[in-house]
C-alpha cells in the first residue's frame, strides 16, 4: 500500500484571486492530477468556476486535469466541458434521472466518465453503472464546502463499493473527495481507495509544498 495510489489536487481551497499560483502549488507539492470542482449554486450552494477556467487550467497544467461537476442537470454541462482538455468528467448520480445517458455523452465527447456520490447515497445506487465508468468518486463530506471533517462512514462505504466493483467485473477506480488529511490517508487506502483528493490539506498546511510529501510519508509507515 502507498506506492500505487494517486493524489488529486483540488484548487477549490486555493486563492481565487491567484488561481495560477494555486495550480502551481498543487503541482509543486506533488499532485498526480488536478481536479476542478464546478459548483453551480443549485446542486450545491456554492459557486466556483466554469468553462474558461477549465480551458486555461488544461492549457497550463503539467499534470492531467479532471472535472468534477457538482451541478444540477449534468447532461447539459457535458457539451460545455467537452474539448476543453480534461481527460475525465465526473458527475453526481443524485443530479441526473438519466445517469447512463450522461455516461454515454461523456464517452462520446472523448472523455472518461466518472460518477460521484454524496455521503447519504448508498453504494448500491451505482451498481448498474459500474461496468461503464472509469471512476467512482465518493464524497467524504457534504459537497461544496472545503475544510470539513471526513465522515467516519466513508470507510465502510469504500469497502461496499470495492465489493460491487469486484462483483460486476468493473475496472473503475475509487476516489475519496473531502476531508482527506495525512492522518486518515492510510486507512482510506486500506479500505480500498485508489485516489485521494486533497484541497484544504494542501493550502491550509503550514508548508503547502511539503503537504503531500508528508501525506505520502504517513501512508508508507
Image: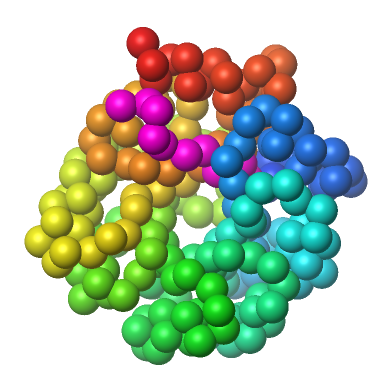
54 versus 201 height, above or below: below
The quarter of the displayed image where residue 161 is located: bottom left
Q: Residue at x 73, y 30 (%)?
A: 28
Q: Position of residue 87 (x, y in %)?
A: 58, 65
| 142 relative to 97 in the view: left or right | right
Task: Classify 13 as above or below 38.
Answer: above
Residue 96: x %, y % from top left: 42, 81
Q: Residue furthest top?
A: 221
Residue at x 77%, y 57% (from the top left corner):
57
| Residue 125, x across and y down, in percent | 23, 69
**For residue 172, what is the image quadrant?**
bottom left
Q: Is residue 46 left or right of residue 115?
A: right
Taking the magenta stretch, the answer to whether it contains residue 9 is yes
Q: Residue furthest left?
A: 167
In the rendered image, residue 173, in percent from the top left (x then y), is placed at 34, 53
Q: Tell me the quarter of the image containing the C terminus.
A: top left
Residue at the image position 69 percent from the left and 36 percent from the top = 26
Say whether residue 220 is visible.
Answer: yes
In the rendered image, residue 149 lying in the magenta stretch gets the answer no
Seen in the picture, residue 35 relative to 198 is either above or below; the reply is below
Q: Is residue 117 above or below residue 8?
A: below
Drawn side of residue 64 relative to residue 184, left or right: right
> Which quarter of the rendered picture does the N terminus lie within?
top left
Q: Quadrant of residue 94?
A: bottom left
Q: Magenta segment, which residues?
A: 1-10
Residue at far right of view = 17
In front of the other: 130 or 16? 130
Q: Do we see residue 124 in this rendering? A: no
Amino acid at each position: 500500500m502507498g506506492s500505487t495510489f494517486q493524489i488529486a489536487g483540488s484548487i477549490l481551497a486555493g486563492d481565487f484571486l491567484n488561481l495560477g499560483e494555486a495550480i502551481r502549488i498543487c503541482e509543486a507539492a506533488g499532485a498526480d492530477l488536478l481536479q476542478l470542482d464546478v459548483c453551480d449554486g443549485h446542486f450545491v450552494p456554492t459557486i466556483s468556476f466554469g468553462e474558461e477556467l477549465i480551458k486555461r487550467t488544461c492549457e497550463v497544467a503539467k499534470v492531467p486535469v479532471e472535472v468534477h461537476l457538482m451541478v444540477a442537470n449534468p447532461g447539459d454541462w457535458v457539451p460545455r466541458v467537452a474539448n476543453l482538455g480534461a481527460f475525465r468528467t465526473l458527475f453526481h448520480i443524485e443530479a441526473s434521472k438519466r445517469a447512463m445517458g450522461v455516461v454515454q455523452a461523456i464517452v462520446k465527447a472523448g472523455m472518461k466518465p466518472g460518477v460521484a456520490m454524496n455521503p447519504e447515497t448508498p453504494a448500491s445506487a451505482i451498481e448498474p453503472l459500474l461496468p461503464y465508468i472509469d471512476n467512482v468518486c465518493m464524497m467524504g463530506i457534504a459537497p461544496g464546502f472545503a475544510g470539513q471533517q471526513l465522515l467516519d462512514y466513508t470507510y465502510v462505504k469504500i469497502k461496499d463499493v470495492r465489493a460491487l466493483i469486484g462483483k460486476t467485473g468493473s475496472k473503475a477506480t475509487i476516489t475519496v473527495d473531502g476531508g482527506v488529511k495525512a492522518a486518515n490517508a492510510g486507512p482510506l487506502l486500506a479500505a480500498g481507495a485508489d485516489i485521494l483528493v486533497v484541497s484544504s490539506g494542501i493550502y491550509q498546511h503550514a508548508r503547502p509544498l511539503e503537504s503531500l510529501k508528508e501525506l505520502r510519508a504517513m501512508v508508507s509507515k
